[in-house]
Amino acid sequence: MATLLRTCQPFDPRGLSSARRFEKEKRKPNPSRVLHQRRSQRSSFRAAMAAEGLKKGIAEFYNESSGLWESIWGEHMHHGFYDTTTPASVSDHRSAQIRMVDEALRFAGVPEDSSKWPKRVVDVGCGIGGSSRYLAKKYGAQCQGITLSPVQAQRAQALAVAEGLADKVSFQVADALDQPFPDGHFDLVWSMESGEHMPDKNKFVSELTRVAAPGATIIIVTWCHRDLSPSEDSLKPDEITLLSKICNAYYLPEWCSPSDYVKIAESLSLKDIKTADWSDNVAPFWPAVIQSAFTWKGFMSLLRSGWKSIKGALVMPLMIEGYNKKLIKFTIITCRKPE
Amino acid sequence: MRLLTHNMLSSNVKGVVNGFPLRLEASTWVEKEVDFNADFLRSMFSKIDWPALFGAAQTVGYVALPESADASMLESEDFLKKFHHALLEIHVEEGALVCPETGRRFPINKGIPNMLLNEDEV
């Protein structure tokens, strides 16, 4: 998509060295037509390498750090939703995280009338299944959760069994960009803070749309960068630098803006497209997470978890900086698949 | 992995025309009792691919399920109990799901299917 900005380098933990070796072996003198073909072959090869590296990186990051997160923050791996008008009760994060789910459902217009509740839910990027279990309990729905991390899927399943929900929720290791589900299966398609991991936003929203049943609700809550002004072609250099550091620590590909998501949804003929900036409602979150890292328990758990988790923790102040500079936007996008 | 889940998973390997149903191989499975809910079963019935459910049930040795079924059978408590058992109470712990066209195996470990494709399969 032309308007998606390259705010982060294509992700390759090996620094593209193997890609370069491959290219060197293949290089020969060629007429310009074939040269053009080779260039686009090289760039699609690089893209494929980057995508594979990103998926592995994401899986390893969450394999390593999920337990740490859960021990301090619980089963929901997403921001809490706080009132902007009253001082945040930062000791009550669990209810803020649950409120985030409820506010998202309300924003999307999921009916309160139980006869209209969703019956089949997919949780795309399900983490350790917090949303899946919550939605299964709230609606009595069947929920399928997918994650790249086998450790997360196992933990999600174990928690479901412990809560007596094993008959309602199931988890698979699968790729959100290539979901193993049939077309039109789910009446609620849920993506809570996973969209920022998707390297191809078009493909991501296309897959959400594909697996949505006619009339289904699609809910995406994700990290975006600010919309560009009409005179801008890209973010400013210091903004790009800031996001690059965050991308590196959290295994994120290129960011996009809320408008980019809206354009993609429109291009897929999705209806009732709504978006909102909830950055002010999540403002107490990162300071609270940083605080938790400095407790004895948090600090020792970090040390035990591994370098990826530590790197993730070190980058937390950059998230606050990004929000303060109005660069990072905590965004909700909801829509419906046409009947 | 319950047979309900098996009933909705398909192979996404590049070039595959019809990746459903995946053939089930089960080396270990357990049965776990689940509360019976007739309304739920009746609402699920139209979404279920019966031949796939029947085939999977056969694989795990549950032979009580009829080979074909129609909505009129939902009146029968006996049928509903069998449907309930096959759909919700059998959990495959170890095994694989096999693509019907390419033979590609998606492993099931500790009840979790791994449906990730390799780069060259996408």
Image (cartoon, coloured by chain):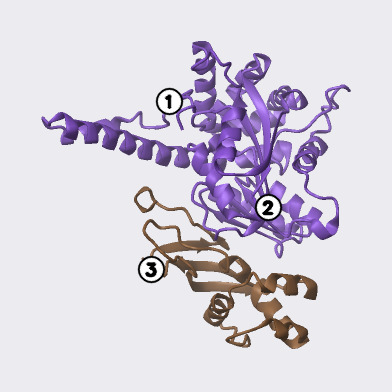
- Which residue is tagged 2? A216
Of marks 2 and 1, which one's residue comes earlier in the chain? 1
Crowdedness of circle 2 by 10 Å Cα count: few (<14), some, many (20+)?
A: many
Which chain is the one coloured brown?
A: B
Residue B96 x/y as whole percent: 47, 67
Q: Nearer the viewer, mark 2 or mark 1?
A: 2
At a point 70% along the width and 51% down the height, the residue shown is A132
Kind of residue sitting beneath label 1: Gln
Answer left or right for A92 relative to A235. right
Q: Are marks 1 and 3 in contact (CB under 8 Å)?
A: no
Measure the alpha-carbon separation of dots 1 and 3: 37 Å
Q: Is residue A280 above or below residue A275?
A: above
Residue A234 x/y as whole percent: 50, 17
- Which residue is tagged 1? A9
Q: Are marks 2 and 1 on the same chain?
A: yes
Figure quadrant of the C terminus of chain A: bottom right
Q: Are marks 2 and 1 in contact (CB under 8 Å)?
A: no
What chain is tagged by disc 1?
A
At a point 84% along the width and 57% down the height, the residue shown is A114
Q: Are marks 2 and 3 in contact (CB under 8 Å)?
A: no
Q: Nearer the viewer, mark 1 or mark 3?
A: 3
The secondary element bearing badge 2 is classed as strand
The secondary element bearing badge 3 is classed as loop
In which quadrant of the rendered view does residue B63 lie?
Answer: bottom right
Kind of residue sitting beneath label 3: Glu
- Which residue is tagged 3? B101
